[in-house]
Amino acid sequence: MNAARLMLEWAILLALAIVGALYAQSTGLTGRIDNQLFDRAAALATPEIDQDIVIVAIDDQSLSEQGTWPWSRALHAQMIDRLDAAGAELVVFDILFLDATDAEADTALADSIARSGSVFLPHTFTRRLNAVSGVDPLMPLPQLTAASAGVGHAVVEPDGDGVLRRFDLMLQTDTSTFPHVALLVDDALRENGRGKGEGRSLASLDEGGEALVPFNPEAAFPQESASNVLAGSTISGFFKDKVVLVGATAQGMGDRYSVAAGTVGLMTGVGMQANLLNALQNDALITTTGLFVQGAVAVALLFVLFMAFWHLPPRYVLVCAAGLAIAMLLASLILLGTARIWFAPGAIIMTIILAYPLWSWRRLSNVSRYLDREANRLIADDPAPVASEGLDYVTRQIDQLRRLISTVRDSLTFLRQVIEAAPDAIVVLDRSGRIEMLNEKAMELFPAWTRLEEATFTELLLFSGARHEKSGSELVTADGRTFLIARADMGRAMSADMSGEASDVEAGAIIALRDVSELRALDDERQQMLEFLSHDMRTPQVAIVGLTNQANRSGENSDMVKRIRKQAERTLKLADDFVQLARLSTPKLQIADSDIGALLEEACDRAYAPSEAKQITIAQTLPEEPCFANVDASLIARMMDNLIGNAIKYSDAGTRICVSLSGCEKGLMVIEVSDEGPGLSDARLANPFARFGAHATHAGPSAGLGLALVKRVVDIHKGTITLHSEPGEGTRFTITIPLD
C-alpha cells in the first residue's frame, strides 16, 4: 500500500471515530455507562452536611402514637406551632395539602402557617384535562397557599434506569415556569445571610435549569420523630434557627427512589429534598459539560490516539490507547471531585476501545497481504513449497515466510561462500552505495574496513591511501600494487513495503579488484621495447638512407647503392608501421571536436606529390557545410594517409582515386576511398585486415600492417569498415564512424 492510500485510510478512520464519538455524546448512546460511573463517583463530590437542616420524620413511632395516616391537619398545625415556639427559622413540608378536609382543621392549619410566616409548601402537577398533552400545576388549598411564605414544586423524575440523579429547579410548562420549593427556601435563607458561594437564584434560572445532586445518606442529617415534636419532648434548642423539613419516612408512606449516594440505594422524598437544599446552601450542585466541550475533548484525544497509531509500535499503541481511556476516566473523576463538574467519559472511552481494534484490523490486513506478497515472490522459483503449519491463517503465513527466509538465508550463505572462493578481491555495495560485504581477499587488501562502519567505497579508498589510475579503471594501493576495477550494477529489484505494494529500487553493485601488477610491469617493458624500436633501430636505418642519398649526389649511383637504399627504406617503413600499430593497441586518445572535411582535404594535399609523380588524379567529394565529430584527429589523419597512400601505391599511372564524405546530417561520417587499381588478391580478401608478413607486389615491398592500422583506428572510434574489390576494377573502402 502506498503512502497516499495509507494516509487516506488513517484519515477516514479518524473521521469515523470523531463522528462516532460526537454521535454517542449527542444521543446519549452511552448514557447507561456514564450513569453507572457517576453513581459510583458521586461520593467524591458530596458536600458536608449542613447541621442547620433538620428532618422531622413522620415515622413508624409517630404513626403508632398519633394514629394512622392521613393525620388531621390540626396535628400539622400543632406541629408548626411547636416548631415555631422552638425557634425554627423555616419550616418546609414535603406533604401535599391539595384537597379540602375538615373545615375547622384546614382553618387551623392556615392560621398556624400565617402566624409562623416562614412555612413553605410543595405543589405538584396534573395532566391537563381534555388535552392530548400538557400539564397544569396542582396547588395546595388556596387558604394554605395564601398563608405560606412560598409554594414550589416538589416533582422528582428519575432517569431511564429508575435512579434519581437530578432535579428540575425551574420546571417549565407551555404557559409558565415553576421553581422548586428547595430553591425558594435557598433564596429565602440567602436573604437572611445564610448559604455559601453565590448560589443559584431564581434570576439565574429564568430559562430553566437542571442540576445533578451529590446525595449524602439520609441518616446523616439531624432527625427528630414527629411524635416527639407533638409531645413537646424535643431537646431544648434542637430546632433553634434551623431549617426544618417535615416528611414521611415510615414504611409504605410517601415516595421512595433509588439515588446515587456512593452506591445506589433507596431514599425518601424528604431525604432527597434535604440533600437538594444542602447542595444549594453549600453551592455544591454538579454541572455537566456542554456538547461543544465534550466534542472538542473527543477530537483532541482521538487525534492523539491516531497520531500514536501512525508513529508508535503496536505494543506501545495498546499502552497509549489504554492510557488515554484511563486518563479520560481519571480526569472525569478529578473534575467531579474538585470542581463538581461532570464530564461523561463513556462516549470517548467507547470510541477509543473500538478505534484500537479497528485500526489494528487494518494494519493486520496489510501485514497479511505483505506476507502473502513476499511469500509469492520468494516461492516464484519453487513450484512445490512445503505446506505451512499453524492454528490460524496468519500463523500459517508466518510459518511459510519463516521457511522461505530460511531458504533465502541458505542461499545467502552459499553466495557468501562463492564470493569468498573468488580469485579476486570482491566488494559488495548496498542500494545506498555503502559497503555491505567484503570477501577475505578484500579484507586483506583493506584492513581499515573493520574500523569504518557503513563506509562508502570511495571513503574506504581514501582511508586506505589507495588512488585511481587511468581514468578510474585501475587502482594503485599504498604498497604500489595495481588492481583492475570491474564494477557490475545488480540492476533494479522489486522491493515490497508492509502493505505488499512493490516498488522498483536500486539493488546495489559488486566491485571486483583483479591484481594486474605483473601485467603492468610487462606493459612497461613493452613500452621500453617500443622506444627501442622507434629510436635505436630507426636511427641506423635513417643513417643508411642518408648515406645512399649522399652517394647519389656524388655520382656513385650504382645498382648496389640503389638496392641498399631500397632495403633501408623498407626496414624503416616496417619499423614505423609496427611502432604505430603497437601504440594503437593501448591508445591514449586525444578526443576533440574536429572538422572531418578539413582532415580529408589535408590528407589529399599531403598525397599530392606522390600522386603527381604517377600522374594519378585525386577527386574529392566533400559537403559544403563543415562536418564536426568528436575524434582523435591525428589517428584519423594517419588512417587517411594509409588508405590514400595504398591507393596511389597500387594504382597504375593515369588512373583516378576518389575520396568522399557523407552522412553527417544523420549523425554519422561515411568516408569512402576508391581506386582503379588491380584489386586485392583472393588470399588478401579472405582476411584483408590481418597482419600479413612482408611480401612483394608489382608496386613494391609490403608488410601488410597498413590496413591493420586502419582497422584499429576504426575500432577505437566505435566504427565499421567494409571493402569491395574486383580484379582489374579497383578497390573501395567504406568507413562509418559516429560523429559523437
Image (cartoon, rainbow, N blue to C red):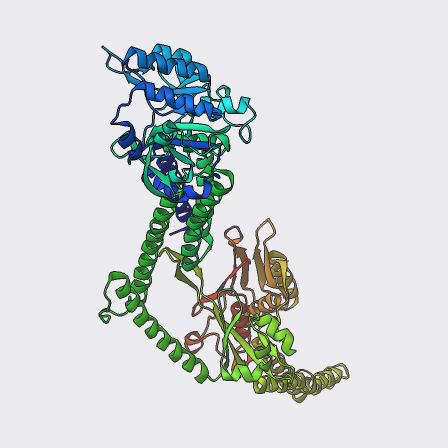
As drawn, 163 above or below 629: above
Q: Which residue is drawn at 29% across and 10% down?
A: 103
Looking at the picture, how far across and down is residue 575, in whole percent?
62, 82
Confirm whether residue 575 shows in the render: yes
Looking at the picture, how far across and down is residue 97, in whole percent?
32, 18
As drawn, 95 above or below 690: above
Nearer to me, 672 or 242: 242
As drawn, 284 above or below 84: below
Q: Quadrant of residue 9?
A: top left
Nearer to me, 401 or 541: 401
Q: Quadrant of residue 658?
A: bottom right
Nearer to me, 250 or 687: 250
Nearer to me, 388 or 683: 388
Looking at the picture, how far across and down is residue 15, in whole percent?
40, 40
Counting every numbered tag in the picture gives 0
Q: Residue at x 37, y 10 (%)?
A: 143
Q: Residue at x 23, y 72 (%)?
A: 386
Q: Considering the image in quadrants, where does the C terminus appear?
A: bottom right
Q: Quadrant of residue 65?
A: top left
Confirm whether residue 469 shows in the render: no
Looking at the picture, how far across and down is residue 39, in whole percent?
37, 41
The residue lying furthest to the bottom in this view is 560
In the picture, measured across the screen, residue 201 lies left or right of residue 142, that is: right
